[in-house]
Amino acid sequence: MPLDLEDILGSRRAERLDLHRAFLNPQLVRVLQTLGFDRTYVRGEGAYLIDDTGERTLDFLSGFGVFALGRAHPGVKAALHQALDLDLPNLVQLDAALLPGVLAEALVDRAHPGIERVFFTNSGAESVETAIKFARCATGRDRIVYCDHAFHGLTTGALALNGGAEFRSGFGPLLPGCDRVPFGDAGALARALAGRDVAAVVVEPIQGKGVYEAPVEYWHEVEALCRAHGTLFVADEVQTGMGRTGRFFCHDHFGVRPDMITLSKALSGGYIPVGAVLTSARIFDAVYSSMDRAVVHSSTFARNQLAMVAGLATLAAFEDENIVERARVMGDRLVAALAPLVERHELLAEVRGRGLMIGLEFAAPSTHGRARFRLMELARKGMFSQLVVVPLYHRHRILTQVAADNVNIVKLLPPLIIGDEEIDRFVAALDDVLTDAGRSSALLVEVGRTMARGSLAARTHRRGARAPGDRVR
């Protein structure tokens, strides 16, 4: 009997939290219920999520940057429907299919002249893992240098390059030979490379955890130091790439030429997991150096025909809709609209970023409310940023995220298709929340009440929950 998807979605919708508790991640359910983020979404449409009551939530998280084109993009959907109808011969493995070559060509065409080859992956973390292996093989060296605050993924090799202690805890020992330097400190990098034993420097052009930036001069020094010491320069563009910052690759802002570029997230169009490592022929040929080594590094689903179609359709939409330029223009518009809020609200210390990757950093006011801010920080460092994220969601139906653990930074990653309406809605909502935050403790009470209700609802739900599958037909 064929699968009846509508029946499953309709008849079992009420079980979703119980199923996650029983078979997936019960701690995530607790977090969602505590924050009151446990709504039942039934549809995605452009920059919006629609729940089972018909209410629309403006999505300024976009799946951590996956939905650059928004949700349910008609061009990507149509291409995938066409691919399914064609019954393409998929994953033959002993084959050189057309579509991976076409997508690789399109990506190489968008990169600097030193980029000549592509290895496809299933995710950003897998792309980073591939870059580590390729760098070690091409240089004959073991060490990898990364930066503090970095986030390169959560698989074991990528985790060894992760600057967040909260992610590393409990998973050691990690990949040896991985050394951390301060982000933006060219002198520290020079010292790390002095022994001429470093295979690669892996770095995000803008750090996702915190939206931290370094000056243009730093990037030229990174490139020069890598060249001088025989070290490969790897730009992790998993989140910053694909137009997010107003250029197709973020490193293009700085005029540098990395030896390898990692991609994922937005390349998928939001449908099929896909990632890529872009590299020079010299590096690629050092790995695949003979017929005996033709499959020395591979990934079963990496050249999945549907993933290739999603990537090609995404790039076509980028061209047709001028997405990269739109990201630049809308990013400038959003930053300009936020600038008066920095003047109006002492709690908002800085707005930074490029294109539509923006960080809002909050700090204690100098006078009114300073003691209240410090009290929150004593309770939990970074607590104030939750006092922004939670009411943005509950009052204004806007989904955002705290940029990292223990920091008062909210990161904005809206779809690159947003327009003036979405920008105006967000700025007005943030103004409202910060006005209350600066005026009294009412916002703290409101968020506390929301979390208390969520915790109570979670306990009540657990006591009365049916076992998954124990449902009325």
Image (cartoon, grey):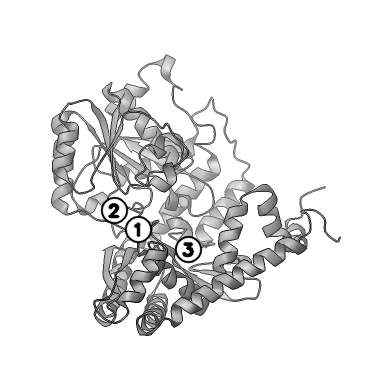
- In the image, taking residue 373 as reference, residue 172 lies left or right, namely right
The image quadrant of residue 135 is top left
Regarding mark 2 in the picture, which secondary structure is present there? Answer: loop
Residue placed under numbered mark 2 in the picture: 206
Image: 166 above or below 407: above
- Judge whether residue 29 can be spotted in this image: yes
Query: Which label belongs to residue 244?
Result: 1
Q: Work out how far the residue at label 3 is from the one at label 1, CA to CA, in angstroms.
A: 13 Å
Instruction: Count the marks.
Output: 3
Q: Identity of the amino acid at label 2?
A: Ile
The image quadrant of residue 189 is top left
The image quadrant of residue 327 is bottom left
Q: Along the line of sight, which residue is nearer the eye, 294 or 237?
A: 237
Would you say the residues marked 3 and 1 are in contact, meaning their CB atoms lie under 8 Å apart? no
Q: Identity of the amino acid at label 3?
A: Gly
Q: Identity of the amino acid at label 1?
A: Arg
Q: Residue at x 54, y 52 (%)?
A: 271
- Viewport quadrant of the C terminus: bottom right
Query: Which label belongs to residue 107?
Result: none
- In the image, taking residue 91 as reference, residue 345 lies left or right, namely left
Q: Residue at x 38, y 44 (%)?
A: 152
Q: Disc 3 or 2, which lies upstream in sequence?
A: 3
Residue placed under numbered mark 3 in the picture: 70
Q: Residue at x 25, y 49 (%)?
A: 251
Q: Work out how far the residue at label 2 is from the one at label 1, CA to CA, in angstroms.
A: 11 Å
Instruction: Say few, some or many: other residues with alpha carbon within 10 Å of mark 3 (under 14 / 14 to 19 / 20 or more).
Output: many
Image: 143 above or below 350: above
